[in-house]
Amino acid sequence: MTLRVVAHRGASGEAPENTWAALARARDCGAAWVEVDVQRTADGVLVLVHDDSWLRTATVDRSIASTPWGEVADFDVGRWFAPGFAEERVPTLEGILVHTDLCFDLEIKSPEFHPGLAAEIVAMIRRHAAQHRVVLTCFDPDVVEDVATQAPELRAGYLAAHPLERTHAAVSVYAIEAGVLLGHASYAAELRRRGAEVWAWTVDDPALAAPLAAAGAQAVITNYPARWLERGVRRTGK
């Protein structure tokens, strides 16, 4: 089996998403790659969080963009998942680049609320010489293509929940919803003919490994990386 395993928001089926605990669980089960969501606080700190507000994960009804880091740093983003994760804190992008050797799919999240976010993420990656272990993805294809143009040393990828006909010479990854790949037999093959990598999201059932590989996927993004890695799916590969 040659599918790369990418832990979705860390091992988010077993630990609170986008936290140090989720990253540690992904690492401990053997995942080399982790997908995380990056946004920006009111005072410019790049943090890991998926939603546009802190309500679900920190029970604070404020938007990410309007909350300063001094407050965010004290948020408990683990208790909502399970009492045993109480006091889990919000990681920063800089923190995970400095303090782990993991490879990251960094989703540029909600760029419409964070003007200039992609450029700031690129600057942080360059500052820590992490170009070799990241892929930058986004649902906004214009953002993806701008990254690919302005930072050609980085891998950039489209995110989509439908067949995407968008192409760009410097965009090398297509992260596509798994059902789309399984339902469109020739789609991934065409992408690979263009030289692109094809990643499937979000796939928690390892029984889909063979069908996805047959459909042309090269990586799976999953909430439960341990399930896949126990079956011998590839652990490494930068």
Image: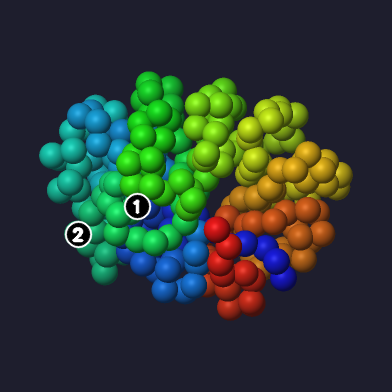
Q: Where is residue 62 in the image (x, y as percent from the top left)?
A: 25, 32
Mark 1 or 2 closer to N-term?
A: 2
Looking at the picture, does residue 124 appear above or below residue 98? Answer: above
Residue drawn at (66%, 51%), measured in percent from left and top?
A: 200
Looking at the picture, does residue 129 appear above or below residue 226? Answer: above
Residue type pointed to by label 2: Glu
Q: Determine whether the residue tagged by mark 1 lies in a helix, strand or loop.
A: helix
Residue type pointed to by label 1: Leu
The residue wearing badge 1 is 97
Q: Determine whether the residue tagged by mark 2 lies in a helix, strand or loop.
A: loop
The residue wearing badge 2 is 87
Which quarter of the image is occupied by the N terminus?
A: bottom right
Q: Position of residue 15 (x, y in %)?
A: 38, 63
Q: How crowded is mark 1: few (under 14 residues within 10 Å), some or many (20 or more)?
A: many
Q: Where is residue 110 in the image (x, y as percent from the top left)?
A: 43, 30
Foreground pick, 112 / 58: 112
Front: mark 1 or 2: 1
Q: Position of residue 218 (x, y in %)?
A: 69, 56
Q: In this view, does 170 lie to the left or right of 216?
A: left
